[in-house]
Image (spheres, grey):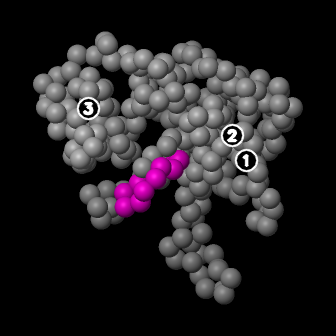
Amino acid sequence: MDKTGEIRFVPLKGIPEVKEGDSLGEMILHAAAREGFSFLDGDIVVVAQKVVSKAEGRVVNLSQVEPSGFAVTVSEEVSKDPRLVEVILGETRRIVKMDERESGKGRLIVETIGGLVLANAGVDASNVSGGEDVTLLPLDSDRSAGVIRKHIEQETGKYVAVIISDTVGRPWREGLTDIAIGCSGMRPLSDRRGEADTKGLLLTATEMATADQVACAAGLLMEKTAALPVVVARGVEYIRGEGSSDELIRDPAHDLFR
C-alpha cells in the first residue's frame, strides 16, 4: 500500500448487546450495512475482547465460585474478593507480582495460560452485567479472529484481517492502552530489517508491532463508555498471511526482565 496515503479508522455503530452464541461476524456485517459501509480489500477489523468473550460464553458469575485456600491467602495479600482471585488463578500460569497499595486496592500481575502478562489475567467486571459477572479472555484469540474473518470474507469476497484487542497497563508508564491479543489474516510484526532508512543506512533491529499499533489507534474510538466494540482500519500497510499474536510475546530466552 502507498505509505504516503491516508489511514482511516471507522467505528461501526449499532452493535447490539452480545450474548453467548451470537455470530460476531454476522453482527459486524449487519452493523456495516446499516451504516452504508462497504468493506474493501485490506481492511483490518478490530474487535474488542469483551464482546468476543461474551459471544464465546467466557463469563463467570462469582456467586458460583468457591475459593480455594490459596485464593483466600492471595486475596488477603492484595485486598481482592477471594472468589475473583480464584477465577484469576484459574487463568494463570504464574504470578509475576502482587502487592497491596495504600489505597487498599491491590495489584495482581500474572502470566496467563496463553502467555500474556496482564493485571488480573484479563479477568474484568466492566461492561458485563453490572452484577457479579466477570469476563475471561477468549481461550484462543487467534482462532476467534479467524472465525470472524472467515465469515466477513465469505459474505463480502474481500480480503480482511481481524485483530482482537484488549486494554492493558504497561510497566514503567502510567495509563492504559490497547494491544492485539489475537489476529488473523496478517503478520502482527512488520520486519524492516535490511531496508534502508532515509539516509541510506540499513536497518538492523527494526520490527514494528503493527497489530499493536492498529489496536492502540482503534482504542481511541473504543472507550469503555462509548459502546463501540468494532472499528475498521483502512489504508494500513501490513503483511498479509496467517500470523499469530504469539509472535508479539518475547521469547523468555531473550527477555531480560524474567
Q: Earlier in the sequence, mark 2 or mark 3?
A: 3
Q: Position of residue 72 (x, y in %)?
A: 16, 27
Quick check: marks 3 and 1 in contact, CB under 8 Å? Answer: no
Q: Residue at x 30, y 31 (%)?
A: 88
- For the residues labelled 2 and 3, the Cα–Cα distance comes to 33 Å
175 within the magenta span:
yes
Q: Nearer the viewer, residue 255 or 96?
A: 96
- The amino acid type, in three-letter code, at marker 3 is Lys
Q: Position of residue 153 (x, y in %)?
A: 74, 33
Q: Position of residue 17 (x, y in %)?
A: 62, 20
Q: Nearer the viewer, residue 12 or 241?
A: 12
How many marks on residues?
A: 3
251 within the magenta span:
no
Q: Residue at x 40, y 36 (%)?
A: 122
The residue carrying mark 1 is 9
Give the image quarter of residue 135: top left
Considering the numbered disc 2 on the image, is that residue within a helix, a strand or a loop? strand
- For the residues labelled 1 and 2, the Cα–Cα distance comes to 6 Å
Q: Which mark is residue 80?
A: 3
- For the residues labelled 3 and 1, the Cα–Cα distance comes to 37 Å
Q: Which mark is residue 157?
A: none
Tell me which segment is drawn in magenta. 170-179
Task: Label the magenta part by its dominant secondary structure.
Answer: strand
Q: Residue at x 51, y 50 (%)?
A: 177
Quick check: marks 1 and 2 in contact, CB under 8 Å? Answer: yes
The residue carrying mark 2 is 231
- The amino acid type, in three-letter code, at marker 2 is Val
